[in-house]
Amino acid sequence: MYTEIKTFEDACKAINVEPTIIPDFSLFPESDRQAMIDHAKLIIIAKAINGDWVPDWNNWDQYKYYPWFEMGSPSGGGFSYTVCDIWHSTSIVGSRLCFETREQAKYVGKQFEDLYKSYFVKA
């Protein structure tokens, strides 16, 4: 069950890879390295949460869900998970960070909010 995946290490175990799978990004600018590491981790987490499901970007009838975040708010709440959303796009480029169900997207958005924040928001 996807709710048993509570950490990056849990995701690695679920898909049978070592947490050391993350590549060395030291050749990239220091300001970008953490976001690249976080993206790699989120891809592994998404793969573990999705199991055998693979998004079919040619199937307009197949819904694909994403966690959606507020980057800031008038109340000063800052970055926080807000909802999951579904998008329809004519792009031929798909996202590796989408989920089969609304519940999965919501779970990942809340459980891994700090990782998404580090990925999306430059420190």
Image: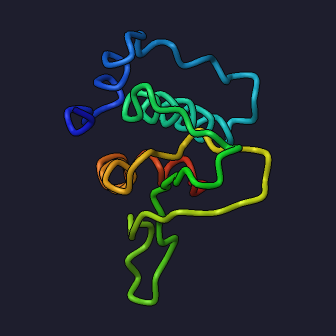
Task: Decide if residue 32 is on the left or right side of residue 34.
Answer: right
Residue 77 image offset from top left, x and y in percent: 38, 77
* Towards the viewer: 13 or 22: 13
Residue 47, above or below 119: above
Which quarter shows the N terminus?
A: top left
Q: Which residue lies at the image location 20% right of the left edge and 33% below the top edge?
A: 4
Q: Which residue lies at the image location 32% right of the left edge and 23% below the top edge?
A: 9
Which residue is at the far bottom?
A: 74
* Towards the viewer: 58 or 3: 58
Residue 16 image offset from top left, x and y in percent: 37, 10
Task: Identify the colour scheme used.
Answer: rainbow
* Towards the viewer: 95 or 30: 95
Which quarter shows the C terminus?
A: bottom right
Q: Quadrant of residue 40?
A: top right
Residue 7 image offset from top left, x and y in percent: 29, 32
Q: Quadrant of residue 30?
A: top right
Q: Which residue lies at the image location 62% right of the left edge and 35% below the top edge?
A: 36
Residue 103 image offset from top left, x and y in percent: 31, 54
- Give the number of marks: 0
* Towards the viewer: 54 or 48: 54
Task: Decide if residue 22 is on the left or right side of residue 48.
Answer: right
Q: Which residue lies at the image location 61% right of the left edge and 17% below the top edge?
A: 23
Task: Decide if residue 99 is on the left or right side of residue 95.
Answer: left
